[in-house]
Image (cartoon, rainbow, N blue to C red):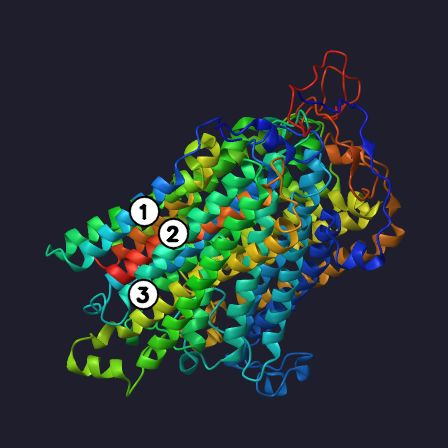
Amino acid sequence: MTHAAATVDQMRPPYPAERGLDVYNTKLGMWVFLASEVMFFAALIGTYIILRFGAPGEWARPGIVLNIKITAFNTFLLICSSVSMVKAYAAIQDGDPKKMRFWLLLTILGGATFVGIQVYEYIHLIEHGFVPSGVREGSELAELVAKGTLPAATMGLYGSTFFTMTGFHGFHVTCGVISMTYLYLTKALPGKYTKQSYGGIETVGLYWHFVDLVWIILFTIVYLI
Amino acid sequence: METAHKRPNYILIWVYLAVLTAAELGLAFELPISRNWKLILLLFLAVWKAALVGLFFMHLKFERWNLRIMAVIPLPLAVIFILAGMSEHIW
Amino acid sequence: MTTVAATSHPVPAHHDDRSFIRKYVFSTDHKIIGIQFLFVSLFFLLVGGLLAMQMRWQLAFPGKPMPGGGVLPETMAPGGVILPEYYIQLVTMHGTFMVFFAIMPLLVGVYANFLIPLKIGTHDMAFPRINMWSFWSFFAAGFVMLSSLFVPDGAARAGWTMYAPLSARHDYSGASLGQELWSVSIILVGLSSILGSLNYITTIINNRAPGMTWFRMPLSVWSLFITAILGLLALPVLSGAAIMLLFDQIIGTHFFDPAAGGQALLWQHLFWFFGHPEVYILILPAMGMVSDIIANGSRKPIFGYHSMVFAIVAIAFLGWIVWGHHMFVSGMNPTLGSSFMVSTLVIAVPSAVKTFNWMGTMWRGNLKFTVPMLNAIAFVAMFVIGGLSGIFMAATPVDMFIHDTYFIVAHLHYVLFGGSLFALFAAIPYWYPKMFGRLMHEGWGKVHFWLTFLFYNLTFFPMHILGMGGHMRRIYDPTQYDFLKPYQPMNEFISISAFLLFATQIIFFVNFWWSLKKGKPAGLNPWQDNGLEWTLPSPAPHGNWERVPTVYRGPYEFSSPQVPEDYLPQTRKLPGDREPAAVSAAH
């Protein structure tokens, strides 16, 4: 089905203006913001790649420190929440606010669960001795280092990069969950989104998909390589 | 505005994403191939998944060319930075 | 399908019933936000200047008690004698305040906010509340940075470039809380900048008045647009780097600590990958505003408008691939270094194009030497000197010798002071009437200009000579080296010129504050300029226009044969003008 120009024009400001990018302000603003976020994650992820590439020794093998099974499930969960988000967007485009609310709620729950699982994973890791500075003395993981299963020279870098990248990603997911909850309570529930005006859903959707996209990259290069 | 287009089949994309994720897991832990090949293939799969999300969920496939350019402009900058940083370790 | 508000008589807005707090403190009006940035940044400019004065005292009279130094704590300057630990804080904080809290917000925070909606013909920014947050996060950042001067161990002290691991480890630098506050402040300043950029970009793309096509925008707006893109993409890298530095400082990560596998050069790459686009952020808006002022002061169209636009874009493009020229002596990959040398030499070309175009604009123009015009012409001359010294250091073999000497200090001050600050001395009086409804005093403005120009050159030109002689940067006591002793009279000369330069700025500050209440009331268009903002009352009202104006031509139609006056505003409709093509509007 086509997406009529009229619905988008409704979301442009009411005064006349040059054509610009034919994209209403909030959506354009979100794309511009996402460009800056790409650079932010590029700094963090680039640092990880550069540090790992130039590391003074072997890097820990995947799966020993981090729990792949739980994180794989978490990845799947985030992807599902991305699907529910775009279903919410499609629903309001079709003029079905009830369906939109349903899918939006699912998205919020999926996102919140993702954060919850991440927090659980962090607590678990810290208990076992994996901290931002590397491996805590006297912990379970310290024994693995002593045995040689984990490389002593790079565990500090591993900790630094892991917690920073996943921590900031988790922070972004949390901000997304909070924003979506806010929009759900103040706009979606009272029926303020209509077939003619659904900019907020599309805009927050873009943010949410971006957060999913970053995780897709992170999961691969942090957990699987 | 988005060009008039048929809505993508979001569920189908979800299936693709699930399959690619499973492929990544299998590749990372089951397949007995060299580390370098694993790295390249895993990165390829990750980028493919990211592209699916970007093109279909974020509707970049259907947006104007100038919005698409805006979305991808940071990527070459990121690549330049990473390559420069890595080049410190190859001489 | 679409409507156009065809009005050749721009109608200003006139209804404003907000409370005092909403009007002047937590305002979402882009003009008020711009003025807020102006007051706060001028304060930080003063702070940066005071820090420099102390540095110059120590360099001219090493180890001697400084007049007024008694107010400083004993741990920093016992008996008024500046200690090395304090000196390096002065160096660091002078650079930090000047770059992040004076020049950048003065050029971007003030003029992007104030000018963009006015010059493109819209009511306000696309996201007024985000704009407000941009100012307040800047304010918070400034407060944090200022407070770092007063913490027990003192402020950050690894230079404004904050090289790691010196900056990352307390046992290396001797400072703890001060360093951490620097990182926190920079993260906040990055946030402010990103939020601002987001607004400027969206507003310029989407909210231009009917008829304000891309190539009818003034060069000030073009440069602010491109600057916003640079800021949008560069500041996040700085924020990321500052976050990693903060983590190294407080939670024990090892990003930049070689002892634990980290990489010192990684900090440099991250910082300068941001840092080079940053210096273009610091010069492009200045160039843009100078273009507007020179065209106005010459009563001629800007020479080569399109090439000016392409030059701005080229500078912005190339600016991403030259950062390594700050790292030639760092031990970086030499092949990489060579590639940076080539790209750095190339980037001189678009700047040269702009310089020739400014000269072409003035050539055989009907020159009006007002205060803004004088400062704008000085900008061109000083920027050329700064740019030429840049060519020297672009060549890696030369930079091996002059890196981290006063030759570099001379270069950066020629482009940042001779360039950006003179442009601000042009822009501030130029748009002052639109901000405050009055003109700054022209006579005192000229006195300020000539004295500043004189003392500025006396201060900074000799630094080229110092640098060639091997006088290094950031040094506490040059007389400790025999080979520098012959240069000590030059250091004294520079310092005295600097004190006089600083004192001269009193004229500017007094003029600024006095004119707020006592300046000559300005009419709508005191400079007889063509931009949209000059069709509004001075000061411009909240909401700018009742109905957005329509634009019929570009901004530089001076001395046009179509009209008897020597200027032709963008919104004036002449009998032969066509209405703009149908534009989008909500229906």
Place of residue B37 in the rendered image (x, y in percent of width and height, measured from the top left): 15, 51
Residue at position x 76%, y 19% from top?
A: C573
User: Which residue is the site of mark 2?
Assistant: A79
Q: CA distance from mark 1 to mark 3?
A: 18 Å
N-term mark: 2 or 3: 3
**Helix, strand or loop under label 3:** helix
Q: Disc 1 is attached to a residue of which chain?
A: B
Relative to C200, residue C454 above or below? below
The circle drawn on residue C517 is: none
On the rendered image, what quadrant is the N terminus of chain C found in? top right
The circle drawn on residue B17 is: 1
**Helix, strand or loop under label 2:** helix
Q: CA distance from mark 2 to mark 1?
A: 8 Å
The reply to whether residue C457 is in sight is no
Q: Are marks 1 and 3 in contact (CB under 8 Å)?
A: no
User: Which residue is the site of mark 3?
Assistant: A70
Amino acid type indicated by mark 2: Ile
Amino acid type indicated by mark 3: Ile
Place of residue C134 in the rendered image (x, y in percent of width and height, measured from the top left): 63, 56
Residue at position x 69%, y 45% from top?
A: C426
Q: Nearer the viewer, residue C456 or B19?
A: B19
| Circles 1 and 3 on the same subunit | no
Place of residue A177 in the rendered image (x, y in percent of width and height, measured from the top left): 52, 58
